[in-house]
Amino acid sequence: MKYKFDMEYFKNVAKVIFTTDSPSGYTLNAIKKVMEFINELGYSYKLTNKGNLIVEIEGTNNDKTVATSAHIDTLGLMVRSINSDGTLKLTNIGGPILPTLDGEYCRILTRVGTIYTGTILSTSPAAHVFKDASSKERNIDNLCVRIDEKVSNKTEVLNLGIQSGDFVFIDPKFEITPSGFIKSRFIDDKASVCLILTVLKYFKDNNIKPTYRTLVYFVVHEEVGHGAASIDPNISEFVTVDMGCVGLDLNGDEFKVSIAAKDSGGPYDYELTSKLITLAKENGIAYAVDIFPFYGSDVGAALRAGVDLKGALIGSGVAASHGMERTHLEGIENTMGLLLCYLLSK
């Protein structure tokens, strides 16, 4: 691949974005971080009522409008109720793999801004006490939060200011290893947010523009299904950047950019998808074409909302999605390369 991206910039951005909590419904702090990076790069932007951030970039030809996106919202948890023993009953936001949450550290945010720490545990958490400590199903009804405060009943928890509807932030455990792996929760889709920012930096560093008027959406409700439901009706092509799937009979891995031909919502646009495959071949970009059977994207949200556009999906291959995820910087670079090639193409 002929393009060289500022991977140190990517790593620095990732450290900020991955360590800023942003479950669907509580994303403003993370969007503000993106705004800071956009300001540093010198692009103009606007914030929509629902919280999406839109960056508009003038093209060398503004007769056509194309778009790309990444979602900064993540899976998460919320307090459903307070148990009689002072632990917190939970409801999930989006679809985290619930057994992977057992034993994870978390933070509880009250409506007045106080933060308490805690641990997500099974309701049978002790092997020396509960016969089913190992065998009990880890579902949302069998998980709770043990708060790191001296509480033993519901009243004492309420006195802390904790109540139903408070967000519970899961520790992402973000790390980039010396071998180039990114290990963290919420690589889906924070890695894409960071790589799009790095592509925008490439445009600035090299004093170039995309071929067409380009709208970049940083979306905040993708994990609950309606992230890009409200977008500019003038968009003719929409290439969203989300995670690529890894496993079973799929072709993708953590070192390639995945190009989705179909997901649970049906096939992506044939011509646009074929164009992306051709661009990858012509530019020496390691890629895989795949079918994602249990998957939806912001393109699907836009199409269901009635926007008349051609849609496609690309993304770095991510292992163990919705759990403790992993990808590699090579996959990130290949995804950046394909996105850049698309934005520079006619």
Image (cartoon, grey):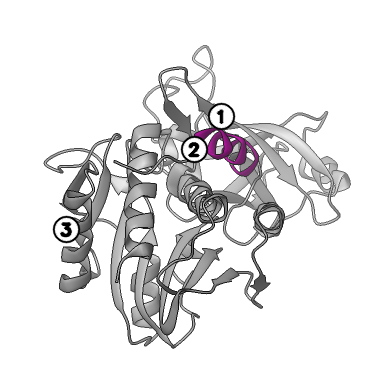
Using a 10 Å C-alpha cutoff, classify the residue at mark 1 as few (fewer than 14 neighbours), some (14 to 19) or many (20 or more): some
Residue located at (72% from left, 43% from top): 108
Dots 1, 2 in contact, CB < 8 A: yes
* Residue 89 lies in the magenta-colored region: no
Residue 190: horizontal and vertical position, in percent?
Answer: 51, 47
Could one spot residue 33 in this view of the protein? yes
Residue 278 is labelled as 3
**Disc 1 marks which residue?**
173
Q: Amino acid at mark 3?
A: Thr
* Residue 14 lies in the magenta-colored region: yes
State which mark lies toward you, 3 or 1.
3
Q: Is residue 327 above or below residue 306?
A: above
Q: Earlier in the sequence, mark 1 or mark 2?
A: 1
Magenta-highlighted residues: 6-17
Residue pushed farthest left? Answer: 249
Question: What whole-number distance in Å separates the C-alpha atoms at marks 1 and 2?
Answer: 7 Å
Please identify the quadrant where the C terminus is shown: bottom left
